Image (cartoon, grey):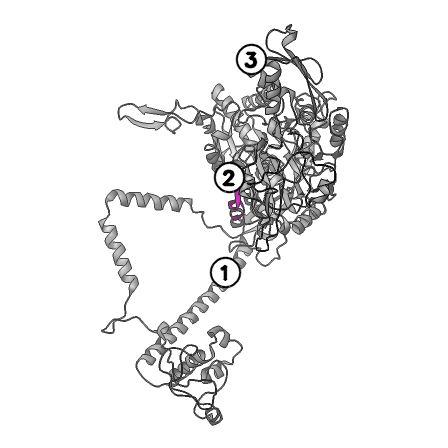
Amino acid sequence: MLVFTPLAGSGRSEQTRPLCYLLTIDDVNILLDCGSFPPGTPTEKTEGYYSALKQHAPNVDLVLFSHGDTAHLGLYPYAHAKWKLAAPAYASIPVQAMGRMAVTEELKDLAMEEQVLPPTEGSAEEEEPMTEKYVATPHEILEAFDAVSTLRYSEPIHLAGKCQGITITPYSAGHTLGGTIWKIRSPSSGTIVYAVDMNHTKERHLDGTVILRSSGGGGVFEGLARPDLLITDADRALTVSARRKDRDTAFLDLIATTIRTSHSVLIPCDPSTRILELLVLLDQYWTFQKLETPICLVSQTGSEMLAYVRSMVEWMGGTLSKDEGGAEIDVSKTGRKRRRDEEEDEAAVGPMSLRFRHVQFFGDAKAFLSAHKPEEPKVILAVPYNMAYGPSRRLFTELASEPGNLVVMPSMGEPGTLAHDLFTMWNERQTEDDKWGKGKVGDIARIREELTIQLNSKIPLTGQELEDYNTREQERAAKEREAAQRAALARSQQLLEADEGDSGDDTDSDEDDDDMAIDRALGGGSDDEMNQDIDPASQRRGGASGHDWSVDDADSARHLSFDIYLKGNVSKAASFFKTTSGATQRFRMFPYVEKGGLKRKVDEYGETLDVGLWLRRGRALDEDAESEEVKEAKRKKREEEEAKKAPPEPPSKFVSEEVQVRVDCQLAFIDLEGLNDGRAVKTIVPQVNPRRMIIVHAPAEATDALVQSCASIRAMTQQIFTPTVGETVTIGQRTNTFSIALADSLLVSLKLSKFEDSEMAFLSGKVPPHGTSSLPVLEPLASANQPQRLSIPEEGESKRTRFGVASLPQTTMIGDLKLTALRSRLTALGLSAEFAGEGVLLCSGGGVGDLEQTVAVKKTGRGRISLEGSTGEVYFTVRDEIYALHAVVSRA
């Protein structure tokens, strides 16, 4: 039984992002993606999703991620740390790394604008209460993504534990580096394919999705064809995208025209996924045109992200050849070999296309503005793409008032964000034929409007605020110093008391300490337990229990008797003298607990041993023995570590202000998101031909359009579900599965036939009662010496036996014949195979007119295949190939 519940991003919602779905296969709960809303989204839109995920998180058994952006996994670190989402998680290798960088970038940018983490010593917001921001700390982010298991494409994983029997396999989805289509195979529910945000078009840094074969006659990839359930999106079912060549040309022409007029271009982008396509496109154009205008990337994780991407060439495609790994070349006179992608090699190829020589990196908008003058021409890539916060939002306020500047929107952003508002302004100024989704790029628009934009920032303290902060810090430091002095005095007093105890003086302090040690030995309590809720004077006087154990307490001495204790401890040793009264043994004087932890370490002459002095002297001797090269290497390493350390942050506070921005710049929207449009979606889904389908991640109008398109196709399933957020879809009935072991004699007799990821065979047996076995064992009905009778039983014979007599079953062929796959196999064997109508394949060994050697293969109905023609070599060859495309299960 399958149960599907959209937690966010349903097929009938205006807010199509984030994506998060709960799929239950029998008793296994699988979480498909775990995205987050963009910062600044109203609470009434987010609380329903966050509360639902918080409720289901502890019960999730498996987590699968499809893409490495915040819309697909942004909430995972927080849920992993705070909501006990500790289930095994799987993603492709790039998705895990890119997702970590995307979440880290969001955290760093938000931390520069508002209090999202517990206050630090350099913050003036310490005393204000913290509100929940659903943002994980840097340590929680690293811990969460370290727990994600990484896979490669087409690598099946057989799960264990509660998920035993389920197999997951990732396939390429396009759109982002490492983007994944998940194939989930269950023995009770069949095959489930989760495919969202796909792109079948080949791009500059990525190939298209594997679901459509680019060679071999096209069609759908066999491993993903005809699933029992397809979960896909219809976000762009109503749109028609312009050709990629037209979009790229318009994008580059707009940028080139703007920088020639000494103006700047602002491009909001994401920090880890689609930014790669923009960088490759710009870098190739800059190299070809030999431009000197700087390309500025404003992102705190941009340099780290690109350094990692260079190691992921095997995951890329498009115009980046996978064999461009930098072949070894011989360097002139020295003969030393190095790779062609090293920094000094100007003629290097391959990874050179991922090194982006024209890109400058800046951590924030302030660093960028201080490095470049406003009148200088430049191209700025700033995060995030939705301009809800961060550098892209602040830089827009700086550049929007200049008439010659250009803002290019590669993505429309989520509703309610600044990017979506700008997209709406641009789309309203287009003609009816040039509006977005009509198959054209659209024209540039001049925006002349007054916008009120709220900016958050973190500024250093000045004036009276700085003085007040310094005063508080001085008071805090004074208290810390006073506490440290008290601790040092107490330590010194303990050492002095230890020295006095070692000298043999019978002081009250020694007697009290002896009594405390004896009481611990007698009562077995720990120091922490005995020191709780005890009056200090009473503790010093009579031990941890508060009683006075001195000789003046005659009553205690009269009622207690003690045996002499020689060695061992209370729990193990026996008494030396026989106890006549039968009372429990109590030891008054022994054992004596020596206060070794308080004694100073001295040698035989009474001199204090300073271990640290000898260690320091040993290190000094080792350093003197080192060579100058080693010392220089260590010095450089220390300098590099010091340079990497962030400078101490000055005292600061968070402020919020509303800025009136006169938008007078040029605005353009060019779709560079790399997603399938409506034509592609309506073509791919019928070719996949699922038995059932669930549509998610789309507005209601787009969902209805895809449903109507599928309904017009006769061979397409009519079981299409479009649940809303929180609505549950139940498919099939609950199936009880049982585990059983096969006897060795039965296992060796099976004739297994492979089908997809499994092997099948027909068998019959019995389970004899075994009281000592935890797992039932299936054994043959007949022993090895007495083979089972397979003849047709006589009338009434089956009634006289306990199990009856099994009759010989018919041969069963499991699978769904694809005539295109059969045609490919026959063509490879040298036979001629051509389609002669819908569902009819004509096969011949010679010419087309050779009717005697012609065989027709027809699919007459669901699961029925007709093979017509004269018997001969062609007939039997076609029949054998049909058998090879099925799992043939029969009794031996």
- The reply to whether dot 3 and dot 2 touch (C-beta < 8 Å) is no
Residue 309 relative to residue 815: left or right: left
When the figure is inspected, residue 587 is found, relative to residue 397, above or below; the finding is below
User: Does the magenta portion include 200?
Assistant: no
User: Does the magenta portion include 144?
Assistant: yes
Residue underneath mark 1: 473
Q: Nearer the viewer, residue 563 or 11?
A: 563
Give the structural element (helix, strand or loop) at label 2. Answer: loop
Distance from label 2 to label 1 (Cα)?
A: 33 Å
Look at label 1 and name its amino acid: Glu
Distance from label 1 to label 3 (Cα)?
A: 87 Å
Residue underneath mark 3: 830
Sooner in the amino-acid sequence: mark 2 or mark 1 = 2
Look at label 3 and name its amino acid: Gly
Sooner in the amino-acid sequence: mark 1 or mark 3 = 1
Dot label at residue 874? none
Residue 159 coordinates in the image, percent (x, y): 56, 43
Residue underneath mark 2: 301
When the figure is inspected, residue 268 is found, relative to residue 287, above or below; the finding is below
Circle 3 residues within 10 Å: few <14, some 14–19, many ≥20: few
Circle 2 residues within 10 Å: few <14, some 14–19, many ≥20: many
Look at label 2 and name its amino acid: Thr
Image quarter in which the C terminus is found: top right
Q: Which residues are magenta?
A: 143-151
Circle 1 residues within 10 Å: few <14, some 14–19, many ≥20: some
When the figure is inspected, residue 714 is found, relative to residue 478, above or below; the finding is above
Q: In the rendered image, which quarter is residue 864 located in?
A: top right
